Image: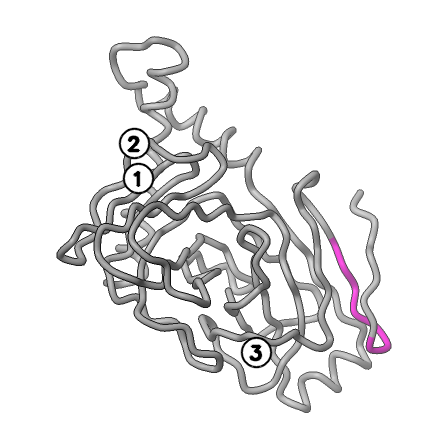
Amino acid sequence: MSKSIAVSKQNQQLHDNVQEAVKEILGATKALGTVEYAKLLTSTLAAATKTVTISIADKDFITLKNSGYKLCFAKKVGNNDFNVVWQSYDDYLSTNTFTWTPQYQLFGTNSFLAGVQVRAQTKAVNVGLGQQVVLGSTGLMGKATTGGPATAITLVNEYRPIHPGVSQLSTGINNEQISTPIYVATAPVVTGNISLTPVETILVWFEQRVETSTMFSDSRSMSIEIDMTEENDASRNYANGAWTTVKVE
């Protein structure tokens, strides 16, 4: 599936979710009109969008570029350790902006192996918080329906032990919008329900010879953890080999 088709399908799922939410909240019997929907969606996404700005001092920038370091991002799920490179970039500049919205996909894979890129082995299904997806006994993923904890994504596993994974939509420093993995369970889950709760905490670091979607199991050096739970915008500066917080105006 191409990146553009995947994003388009995810946007359609968001459209459907917003329309259903409006009906439930207002008791409406029909969908919003085009203009009303556009206004609601714009304001909803604006309120939910998280943005982090990463700036790099000139001396450090030259050192990092000359040594082949990439600027990397990871995102937390539940109380688990960061374990997938959400995005990695070698085309970063002195100031870089990375944003994301709460638009997710749920998938399953047969293994977790550090140093290897994630490969979804079920369909990746568009899903929102407070929704669940059934992985049937044949190994086929169904459509997302309401169910499970309101702040989580729930997999109803009727198949056999499998490693659930979550992808999330982001807009990178190159302005490309794409959904890529943020998490894969390190151990397979047995049949039954498993809830995965995305947390608005990210990890930012520099690393050589690493690719987007690579799984990892150890801590990252040259990193900073940024908690975005209570804020939508954050800024950090990397200078003299250390991170500092920049006040957002």
Q: Secondary structure at mark 3?
A: loop
User: What residue sits 60% from the left and 46% below the top?
Assistant: 50
- Decide which of tag 1 and tag 3 comes sooner along the chain: 1
Q: Which residues lie in the magenta part?
A: 235-241
Residue under pointer 1: 13
Residue 226 image offset from top left, x and y in percent: 70, 55
Image quadrant where residue 187 sits: bottom left
| Mark number, residue 90 | 3
Q: Are marks 1 and 2 in contact (CB under 8 Å)?
A: yes
Is the C terminus in the top left, top right, bottom left or bottom right quadrant? top right
Residue 149 vertical position relative to residue 249 in the rendered view, above or below: above
Residue 73 vertical position relative to residue 76 in the rendered view, above or below: below
- Decide which of tag 3 and tag 2 comes sooner along the chain: 2
Residue 213 image offset from top left, x and y in percent: 45, 71
Q: Nearer the viewer, residue 132 or 176?
A: 132
Image quadrant where residue 160 sits: bottom left
Answer few, some or many: residues within 10 Å of disc 1's Cα (few below 14, many 20 plus, some between 14 and 19): some
